[in-house]
């Protein structure tokens, strides 16, 4: 006589301490084993794309901030560079260097949140607070430059809004010196902790071919062993002037492409970002940051797809212009949107506690999924 | 590394009667125009062919081309006629490091495009979003329903002639 | 001890009160203190300050929280199973409180001088399981049920290593009464359990590593018994909101809380009695030094509480450092690692004691 079992549908509802934002996950379970994960999104939809069609090109920049609110600098970066390419504007070199420094600092800040909340989901409460203490230092640097801690509206078409204040480079150098030993502290506390490894190694494995087909990018793709980074493979801005490496997941503990690899790639990227910042601080020239800002932004008729390596993956802007002051279409290809769609494929066959770990390792933020 | 003209040549040799053309009048890169009902076959060929190997779909987006005409008939009603929706596919190859843009245009009254979900799984949610925002039906899509808006919403917001409905579920919409 | 007081005062009622009220009072006061301690310890470990405003450095914070909890509305979900739902917290609390009767705070005051000591404590801890299951089922909530089932499985499984280690120590001391065990560890630190206990000769040195292993095993099992991280799945906030106590509010929630912290002290006290000399001081008594007789029991209470507090502190320390273990890994640890080690330890200690 066979045991009659039923599949149970469990809802990790829109309000839940560990889904990163308003996300509803419908889990189809058999006992504690997950058969299927169906995400339901749209709770944070703010109609960014429709707004963009009603405003002028520079007015869209603050709206781009609010999509991935943990990495606002990069959202601005992608949009603004796309328009500059469409219009053929050459920005001064100082502006390029400032953008790279801000972008890499933002990458560190975003990764700190990702790593901290990942530990929090698994029950390690303390690294979260240590990492936020370090993130405060970065946010203070940003606040001294442009006045805002989270949503900056800093990068404008053709330049940046404020020049660096005189103390900025010295303080950034101090931050770099301060932050390097803390990475080692984090490794001691969490990364090589046996319990943490038990929870994350061999969980949520995504083989490289499938990762490319699913459209994963950024640390998720590199965690699966694919050495692909837009800063090296498809360089934009002045990233080809810097010397840094691309960390790739190698399955140090467990298999290639599991949650631990995705986590470890982010930690290695922190170190590489510090290298880039150091080189940029050495090489930055003087100049005027607002010389190339046009009075009216009116790109010619055409379209462009420009992508940048945001902290969460490949952030792409598809801008269609019809020659007027307002864009005809701005489509944002958000990295978390594609990462979340992959969770149905990655999380089959694991336990509920593992779904939380997988979701944390994919590093999503609902602001850019729903836009 | 191939540029769009060479890719066009390869495609034309493979599928001479699909009517594949290139559109290079815009200042940015040329794009390849494909018939919307044949896009999945072309996509699979692009992914599997050794010279091309487009294994990654970067982006799939619907665009309202805004090229319809307003027609006023005898009663004074204004309707839109003609016009197209386009779906743009941005592909790139991680192995050979080249990019291409495809475009499939379909009419406004009954927009239908073949789904490329069988070729690149990354397209599943992008196609759902294009359906949600424009009403473009993707044939053979495994799960075509609204993604960002509530399931019972009326209308397709990103169309240029979209107006907000008066009520939704008993709530008045214009604030 | 109750007989002693009823002899002195000639009244059974006063003896009864004198036997019951102090442990209860201690439980409540200890919980108030321990919650504040946990918040301060966690805060300082996380590079922040913790409660600072209510009272001196937040000392009255717990009192404020409990007063707030007490005056909250007692919500019972409409579809909940009322009898089960209402009784569950009290059952959990009673289980822990009963066990306090066997703790030897001093040499002359023990709640009950029954001979079964530790056996009684282990048996009565089973109430907790029943209470948790009732709480989970009676809440009529999928999450609570999951939490309760996990918790029941966890506690029942980890009682086995606990029992095995306790058996080892019973072989070692030869008696089940906790008061007797503390008495055997008199006279300076040298006779404490962890350093070989009241044995003499070569056996004392041989047995030290195995006693140490027994101590580690008992410590880990007791972490699991009290649902503390890394074994705090039943109350894992990030997965199941609050586990089995999701639906509780007000007094009943306070009961669960009280029971959890009291349980923490209980297992620390058992550890202390077995391995660290119970209420014995590590270097003699000031009372004996100055010839003041009645000072000695007070000092013993002091030492007992201090040692118990130290282990409570270690438990809190671990909670804020380590991540959480998954359900099946928790069971693996228990059945595949702790139980075999406990068995082997038992055998070896038995062999050494025969010598």
Image (tube, helix red, strand yellow):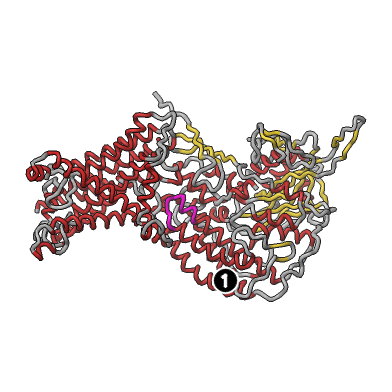
Q: Main secondary structure of the magenta part?
A: helix
Report the magenta residues as a range. Answer: A116-126
- Asked if residue B156 lies in the magenta stretch, the reply is no
Q: Name the residue: 14% across, 49% down.
A: C109
Residue C321 visible in rendering:
no
Q: Chain of mark 1?
A: A
- Asked if residue A121 lies in the magenta stretch, the reply is yes
The residue carrying mark 1 is A172
Residue C229's x, y, as percent?
36, 50
Residue A141 visible in rendering:
yes
Pick whichever, C111 or A129, lies toward us.
C111
Q: Name the residue: 70% across, 51% down.
A: B52
Q: Which class describes the residues within 10 Å of circle 1: few (<14), some (14-19), or many (20+)?
A: some
Residue A360's x, y, as percent?
51, 50
Q: Is residue A195 above or below residue A144?
A: above
Q: Is residue C285 left or right of residue A370?
A: left
Q: Is residue A168 above or below residue C226?
A: below
Residue C123's x, y, as percent?
22, 39
Q: Is residue B110 above or below residue C178?
A: above
Q: Is residue A308 above or below residue A38?
A: below
Residue A334's x, y, as percent?
64, 50
Pick whichever, A300 or C75, lies toward us.
C75
Q: Is residue C87 left or right of residue A138?
A: left
Q: Is residue B44 left or right of residue A150?
A: right
Q: Name the residue: 69% across, 62% down.
A: A155
Q: Is residue C55 left or right of residue B116?
A: left
Residue that lies at the very extreme toward the right in this rendered image: B74
């Amino acid at each position: 006589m066979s045991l009659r079992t039923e599949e149970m549908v469990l809802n990790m509802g829109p309000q839940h301490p560990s889904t990163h934002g308003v996300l509803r996950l419908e889990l189809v379970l058999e006992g504690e084993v997950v058969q299927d994960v169906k995400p339901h999104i749209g709770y944070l939809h703010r109609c960014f794309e429709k707004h963009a069609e009603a405003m002028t090109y520079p007015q869209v920049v603050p709206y781009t901030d609010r999509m991935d609110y943990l990495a606002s600098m990069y959202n601005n970066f992608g949009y603004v560079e796309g328009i500059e390419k469409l219009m053929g504007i050459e920005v001064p070199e100082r502006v390029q260097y400032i953008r790279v420094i801000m972008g890499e600092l933002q990458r560190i800040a975003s990764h700190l949140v990702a790593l901290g909340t990942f530990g929090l989901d698994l029950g390690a409460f303390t690294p979260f607070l240590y990492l936020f203490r370090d993130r405060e230092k970065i946010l203070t640097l940003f606040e001294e430059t442009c006045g805002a801690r989270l949503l900056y509206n800093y990068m404008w078409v053709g330049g940046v809004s404020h020049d660096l204040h005189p103390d900025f480079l010295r303080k950034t150098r101090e931050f770099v010196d301060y932050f390097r030993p803390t990475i080692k502290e984090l490794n001691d506390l969490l990364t090589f902790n046996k319990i943490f490894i038990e929870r994350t190694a061999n969980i949520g494995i995504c083989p490289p071919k499938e990762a490319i087909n699913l459209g994963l990018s950024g640390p998720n793709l590199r965690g699966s062993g694919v050495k692909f980074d837009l800063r090296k493979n498809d360089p934009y801005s002045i990233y080809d002037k810097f010397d840094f490496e691309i960390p790739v997941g190698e399955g140090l503990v467990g298999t290639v492409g599991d949650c631990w690899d995705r986590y470890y790639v982010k930690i290695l990227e922190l170190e590489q970002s510090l290298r880039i910042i150091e080189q940029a601080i050495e090489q930055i020239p003087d100049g005027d940051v607002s010389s190339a800002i046009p009075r009216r932004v009116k790109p010619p008729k055409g379209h462009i797809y420009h992508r940048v390596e945001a902290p969460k993956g490949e952030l792409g802007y598809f801008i269609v212009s019809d020659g007027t002051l307002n864009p005809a279409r701005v489509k944002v290809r958000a990295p978390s949107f594609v990462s979340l769609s992959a969770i149905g494929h990655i999380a089959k066959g694991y336990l509920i506690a593992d779904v939380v770990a997988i979701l944390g390792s994919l590093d999503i933020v609902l602001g850019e999924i729903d836009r | 590394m191939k540029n769009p003209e060479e890719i066009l040549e390869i495609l034309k040799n493979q599928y001479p009667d699909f009517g594949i053309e290139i559109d290079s009048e815009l200042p940015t890169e040329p794009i390849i125009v494909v018939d919307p009902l044949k896009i999945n076959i072309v996509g699979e060929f692009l992914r599997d062919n050794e010279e091309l190997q487009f294994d990654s779909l970067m982006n799939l987006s619907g665009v309202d081309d805004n090229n319809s005409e307003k027609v006023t008939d005898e009663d004074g009603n204004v309707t839109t006629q003609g016009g197209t929706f386009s779906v743009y596919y941005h592909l790139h190859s991680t192995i050979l490091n080249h990019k291409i843009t495809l475009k499939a245009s379909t009419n406004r009254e009954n927009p239908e495009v073949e789904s490329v979900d069988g070729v690149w799984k990354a397209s599943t949610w992008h196609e759902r979003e294009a359906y949600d925002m424009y009403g473009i039906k993707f044939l053979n899509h495994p799960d075509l329903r609204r993604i960002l808006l509530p399931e019972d919403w009326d209308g397709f917001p990103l169309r240029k002639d979209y107006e907000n409905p008066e009520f939704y579920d008993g709530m008045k919409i214009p604030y | 001890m109750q007989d002693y007081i009823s002899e002195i005062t000639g009244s059974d009622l006063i003896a009864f009160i004198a036997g019951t009220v102090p442990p209860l009072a201690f439980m409540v006061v200890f919980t108030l203190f321990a919650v504040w301690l946990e918040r301060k310890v966690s805060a300082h470990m996380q590079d922040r300050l913790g409660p600072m405003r209510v009272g001196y450095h937040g000392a009255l914070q717990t009192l404020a929280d409990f007063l707030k909890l007490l005056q909250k509305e007692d919500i019972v979900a409409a579809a909940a199973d009322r009898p089960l739902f209402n009784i569950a917290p009290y059952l959990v609390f009673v289980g822990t409180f009963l066990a306090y009767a066997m703790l030897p705070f001093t040499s002359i005051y023990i709640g009950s001088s029954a001979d079964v000591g530790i056996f009684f404590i282990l048996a009565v801890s089973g109430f907790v399981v029943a209470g948790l299951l009732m709480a989970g089922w009676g809440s009529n909530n999928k999450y609570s049920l999951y939490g309760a089932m996990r918790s029941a499985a966890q506690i029942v499984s980890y009682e086995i290593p606990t029992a095995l280690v306790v058996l080892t120590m019973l072989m070692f001391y030869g008696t089940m009464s906790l008061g007797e065990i503390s008495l055997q560890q008199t006279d300076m630190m040298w006779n404490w359990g962890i350093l070989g206990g009241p044995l003499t000769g070569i056996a004392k040195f041989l047995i030290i590593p195995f006693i140490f292993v027994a101590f580690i095993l008992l410590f880990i099992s007791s972490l699991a018994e009290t649902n503390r991280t890394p074994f705090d799945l039943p109350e894992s906030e990030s997965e199941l909101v609050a586990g089995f106590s999701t639906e509780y509010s007000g007094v009943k929630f306070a009961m669960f809380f009280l029971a959890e912290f009291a349980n923490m002290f209980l297992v620390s006290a058992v550890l202390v009695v077995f391995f660290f000399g119970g209420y014995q001081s590590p270097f003699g008594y000031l009372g004996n030094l100055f010839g003041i007789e009645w000072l000695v029991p007070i000092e013993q209470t002091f030492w007992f509480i201090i040692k118990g507090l130290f282990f409570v502190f270690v438990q809190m320390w671990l909670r804020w450092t380590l991540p959480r273990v998954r359900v099946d890994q928790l069971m693996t640890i228990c059945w595949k690692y702790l139980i075999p080690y406990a068995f082997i330890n038992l055998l070896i200690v038995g062999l050494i004691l025969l010598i």
